[in-house]
Image: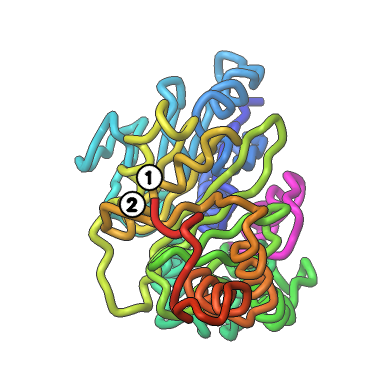
Amino acid sequence: MPTNHIFFHDDVDGIISAAIFLSCNSKSESSSNDYRLYPVTSVMRGERFNDLFLSVKMRPFDKRIVVDYQYHKDADLWVDHHYDPEFGDCIIKNDKMNYSPKEKCAATLVDEMFERYFSFRSVDTLTTVQMIDSAGYPNVPFIFKDTSPLMVLRAYLEKILPSEMMYCRLVEVIAACNLDVEKALFRMRIESSHVNDLEKLARQIRGSMTVCNKLSIVNQKRSNQFPRYSEYLIRPELKYQLRFTPMGMNKFNFQIGFNNWQSEANQFNIGKMLMAMQGNHIVKGGGHFNVGAGVVMDDNIEGFIDEVSRILNEEDVMEKYSVDSTDSVEQKASELVKEGSAKNIDDARKTAAAQTKPATEDSDGVGAKGKIQ
């Protein structure tokens, strides 16, 4: 029995991409054709993915399929829309590759491969996957209110602890339902209440945000502690957000995103910016024009924040993230930010300075430590 080993990104686009392939491919080949599913996270890009890919025990008639994830030279089929520096901005379509970095989601590319014979194309489904993967929501409140099937699935993925078996089951049930996501969610008892819970979780981020001009910086204790875009729900005027999550072994996963819903345009290709930083500030990184992710060592976090802040804030001078924790102004300012009494660290320092310095000092005076590097 030949086996298709299907690697897919563990997000909405990856799940739907794998479900389309599984559903269509099962009808285009012998019913004896078997499969195995391998969900992969963003932090597995690079050597970790290569190790997983090569660890699969292959027979001469087996195939390795990669959808919505990075290129591997030994893949029998690779379908992706993430920018790859090896292939650039060109579009490649042949028997082994379907690559289009200008496409909004990989699911569209997978679907078009089977469109002539076995397509289960749903315009609404693919349009919604494109909206989710490209962060093309009409506004931020929509993210925490809309209860259409794919938005419910998205909310569910935001809340759960990562589980390989759960991602695999989602792919299998959606494929078995011929891409009827609503029916699949019903079978798996995934309710719209997950969307209702999302806003409550999002508002808990307020006390964990440090704002540096146009950029919010958050250290979260675990993955999915706060839903994506929580920063923009609390502070709609923010232009960018940067989050860190501990991975162990002195490594941190990070995500950077642009706020599509504020008035200014993004001038930087975040994915390319992160690729350029590899080997310098970060271990690895990449993404799209408006979003990116990667891995950074603990010792390099401060330098990475400095560089990101300098670039994204478009300034030659910038806020230093790590400051002297023994400074009385900094201690008070940190308390004000955590309790939500100040909008950002600058406002907090002004208030703290007025409260902790002698009355004869200018009320707008700020301690030198941590102000401008």
Crowd tier of the residue under label 1, counting other residues whose Cα lies within 10 Å: few below 14, some 14–19, many 20 or above: some
Q: In this image, 190 relative to 215: left or right?
A: right
Please report the bounds of the magenta region as a residue range: 158-178
Q: Is residue 108 in view?
A: no
* Residue at position x 39%, y 67% in the image: 213
Determine the residue located farthest toward the right in the rendered image.
Answer: 189
Q: In this image, 94 relative to 208: left or right?
A: left
Please tell me whether the stretch drawn in magenta is mainly helix, strand or loop. helix
Q: In this image, 109 relative to 365: left or right?
A: left
Q: Which residue is mark 2?
A: 310
Q: Is residue 186 above or below residue 89?
A: below
Q: Name the quadrant containing residue 227.
A: bottom right
Percent across and percent down for residue 163 are 75, 48
Q: Secondary structure at mark 2?
A: helix
Percent across and percent down for residue 73 are 40, 22
Q: Which residue is mark 1?
A: 307
Q: Secondary structure at mark 1?
A: helix
Determine the residue located farthest toward the front in the rendered image.
Answer: 360
* Residue at position x 77%, y 69% in the image: 187
The amino acid pointed to by label 1 is Glu
Percent across and percent down for residue 171 are 64, 53
Percent across and percent down for residue 178 are 58, 62
> Does the residue at mark 1 contact the one at mark 2 (Cβ under 8 Å)?
yes
Determine the residue located farthest toward the top in the rendered image.
Answer: 60
Per the model, the C-alpha gap separating discs 1 and 2 is 5 Å
Residue 212 shown in magenta: no
